[in-house]
Image: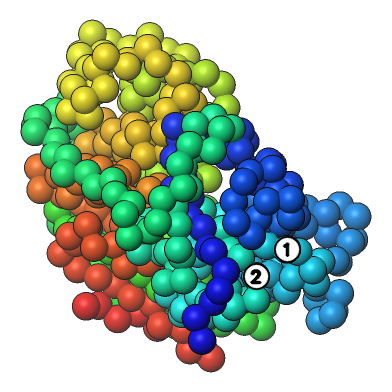
Amino acid sequence: MKSSHHHYAIEDTTRSPQAHWLPHLLNGAYKLPGLEGKKGVLFSNSVLEKYIQEEEKHDNFELTSRINRSIRTLSTGEQKKALLSYLLQQNPDFIVLNNPYETLDKASVSVLKQQLISLSKSMPIVFIFNRQDDLLPVITHIITFEKEELKALVPIEDYIFKRSAFVFDKDIPTAITTYTNIPEVLVELKNVHVNYEDRSILKDINWTIRKKEFWHLIGPNGSGKTTLLSMIYGNNTKAYGQNVYLFGNKKGSGESVWEIKQKIGFISPAMLELFKRSYTVEQMIISGFFDSVGLYQSPSTLQINTAAQWMDVLNLSNQKNTSFLKLSPAIQRLILIARAMIKHPPLLILDEPLINVDDEGTALVSALINKIAKESDTSILFVSHRDEPNIHPDFIYELHPSPNGSIGKQK
């Protein structure tokens, strides 16, 4: 049965921030069939986060009152399911879905997608998207905004999706930082197992990362990707007493966490929270030499020149004095990667670097990652919850959940 409703999609771009038009859209202020004069609800990660905080601060279990559980204890997929169910109980006229699949693994995406297709038969849907592949097959029109003005309403078959054919055509700057005594094997995990209280997270993990290798770590939500990363990069006490070897030394045998971190470049979406002050593009990249948030030391001429070369590679030379916070998510990721790579560390860990990045930005960030893999001696560990067609790793390490903890398989 085909839905009789109009269903809309809005491309999530920095050119027209949601803050301008989203409140008006939810209040039915725009002349759009099925939405005008109606009231909508918003399904998004930020809304979910508000309910989680509300529960923590005020013991208000609105989302999970039916199942008598704290929302924090649910998987990401279950949290989103609880939010959707709660929103639909409000009997809205329509629902706005803001990148609903972000942070979900493939299985959860598939379940949610079917739910939304089913929902589309009974109410109009507005789908805010980063990635064209995420769009529901029921979408009929694309909406574009100019600030808070409704700019265009285009049938989906007539809409031209942006595609980036961008290439970085300058070579990566050479290393000016030297590391001594870096062995061939950078990371080695032998029969690693992790339990938290009565729950098994990882079971018999055997994994070796050597110099100049490009790995993609994948696995569904809750399969232990974050735990595995924290064994390597973080201060996860579960790593002590186990056979975890980093740069030739058994973890916990004398080398400090700081000494380990100096040999690893690291980026994750959570890092963006650190950079709240207005640092320029140049300051951000140079700060990679000092592993600092902001720039408190005077860089050498050589360091300033190297940062200039990186900005040249990224085609950002003319924006060196621009505030990092004013740039799009994709450009921010490029800068964070350059910051992490400026010392040419033996290992670069990229934890979900493409979250909240649109198709055009994904192509851009992926091109830089592939370039680093090709032109440097740095090993790359790329982590994501979805397949990324633009990423070209040498190897894939996949976590498969089991009742006794996730087991790892090399592909």
Residue 326: numbered disc: none
- Residue 159 versus residue 272: which sits nearer the camera? 159
Residue 123: numbered disc: 2
Residue 251 visible (yes or no): no
Tell me: 393 left or right of 103.
left
Q: Check disc 1 and report the residue beneath it.
A: 93
- The picture places residue 304, in percent across and down from the top left corner, at 26, 13
| Residue 390, above or below 171 | below
| Residue 129, above or below 302 | below
Q: Residue furthest bottom?
A: 403
- The picture places residue 340, in percent across and down from the top left corner, at 33, 37
- SS for tag 1? loop
Residue under the point 35% across and 28% down: 288
Asked if marks 2 and 1 touch (Cβ < 8 Å), the reply is yes
| Residue 305, above or below 77 | above
Residue under the point 75% across and 55% down: 39
Residue type highlighted by circle 1: Asp
Residue type highlighted by circle 2: Met
